[in-house]
Amino acid sequence: MTEPLVLDALGPSGPYRARTRQPIPDVAGNPLAELSLVPKLFVTRAMSALRRSRLLPRQERLAALTEAGQRFATGEVDGMSAGDYQYTVSRMSGNPLPIVRKAAAAIARSAAEAYRSAQQARPVGAVNDWRESTAGRGTAIWIRRGSVFAVHAAGNHPGVHSLWLEALSLGFRVAVRPSRREPLTPYRLVSALRAAGFGDDQVVLLPTGYEAADEILRQADLGMVYGGQDVIDKYAADPTVLPNGPGRSKILITADCDWREYLDMLVDSVSHEGGTACVNTTAIFVEGDATPVAEAVAQRLAAIPSLPPEDDKAVLTAYRLDDAKKFENYLHSAADGATAHLGGGGVVDELGDGSAVLRPAVYQVDDPNAPQVNVELAFPCVWVAPWSREAGTAPLTNSLVLTAVTRDERLIDELLADPAIKNLYLGNHPTYWMEPGIPHDAYLGEFLMRTKALIRD
């Protein structure tokens, strides 16, 4: 690519090239793209246009979603082939090329199944349409809590753009503020949706600076944001915003199970998706001696090769060298007092072009309540800790996913009852397991929709 890729805002009247543009480098720091940043007034007008837009009938929406997913994953969109898109995202975000390919296929699948997946949240006593026969004797009807949905998207993984498609399937008009780390995926997806039949005033891409970002949420009826703990805290009391933050996913192995039978699952849970996702394992708790588990996981993770992100065999995520060193410094600060089985001498592996991969780290702590077990980092980093019945479920809570390898049914009941353990997987199931129609952090439909009583003649 000789000239930077130009990524316009996609407003209600079509593409818009702003005067203010954000350079987007590749992982080596080379110019790769320019992203138009729209001002607050543009945001206000775009959100108003979404609110005024005509609702696309359901069957047309669903057909357009399916077509858009296929265009996005395999076709040419805005002059860019699927292969060029995948390569560019890999260089832009540092996500390994195989992960980008899988994410593209997953987005296509999610687009095709968005409505079916959203329907899993509908109460069994509610209907979708007032014309259904049950309304004659009285029923509940499932309706949107508004008409405009906003997304402040993350850039750590293309797959985050699977979820908001459910809102589109339910009839919401959607505004997406892309991450400036990787804006190409939402740009391509919104472009594909428009090419498949959604109007320019039904789904928009609004890249902004920080000043205008909150305006997108203020102008929407409902919103979803991604970020760190600071983002969770900022929006925790706002019932119109759904925050998505750190996962702090964990695995527990009790003494009645042989950890050796689950070693593949342990390693995959840590390293899958380059270790960047909220569903990657942050901590492994072991009832009994945790050292053999830490040693075995470290040995397996050490064998992962360091390769450029665009390599077909790449596993590890790449970063600009200065960013990689910041991660390494933070790791060593957080690991004070822990025993390093892998990564103690450093995790930055330079690729020779100004970029580096972050190699896996495995540390062991001697207390299940050690603060490190909730330190989540954007590369394969896991804390291995002892666990006992006396420690109880307290160290395991505040987890997006907990995989429990245990035969103790009473313990399973306790874990299931903990509302701060969002998802519980039992046995040989990695923490990254997800399927359309299965809740991730509850069903998005629980947030988007509500029931209303209805009776008609």
Image (spheres, rainbow, N blue to C red):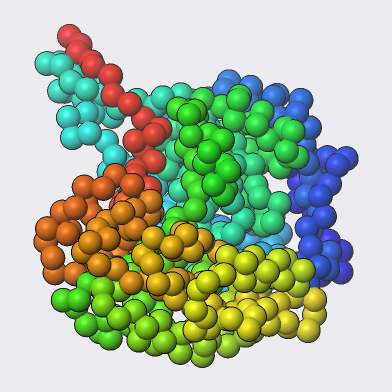
Q: Residue at x 83, y 68 (%)?
A: 30
Q: Left of 214 or right of it: where is 130?
A: left
Q: Left of 100 or right of it: where is 183?
A: right
Q: Nearer the viewer, residue 93 or 322?
A: 322
Residue 313 x/y as whole percent: 56, 84
Residue 23 x/y as whole percent: 82, 55
Q: Nearer the viewer, residue 63 or 251?
A: 251
Q: Residue at x 36, y 37 (%)?
A: 445
Q: Residue at x 63, y 79 (%)?
A: 347
Q: Is residue 310 above or below residue 219?
A: below
Q: Left of 390 or right of it: where is 153?
A: right
Q: What is the quadrant of residue 323 in the picture?
A: bottom right
- Examine the rendering and report whether any part of residue 67 can be seen: no
Q: Is residue 446 above or below residue 283?
A: above
Residue 64 x/y as whole percent: 48, 45
Q: What is the quadrant of residue 76 in the picture?
A: bottom right
Q: Residue at x 57, y 22 (%)?
A: 51
Residue 198 x/y as whole percent: 55, 39
Q: On the rendered image, what quadrant is the N terminus found in?
A: bottom right
- Examine the rendering and report whether any part of residue 213 can be seen: yes
Q: How many marks?
A: 0
Extreme residue in the top direction: 457
Q: On the rendered image, what quadrant is the C terminus found in?
A: top left
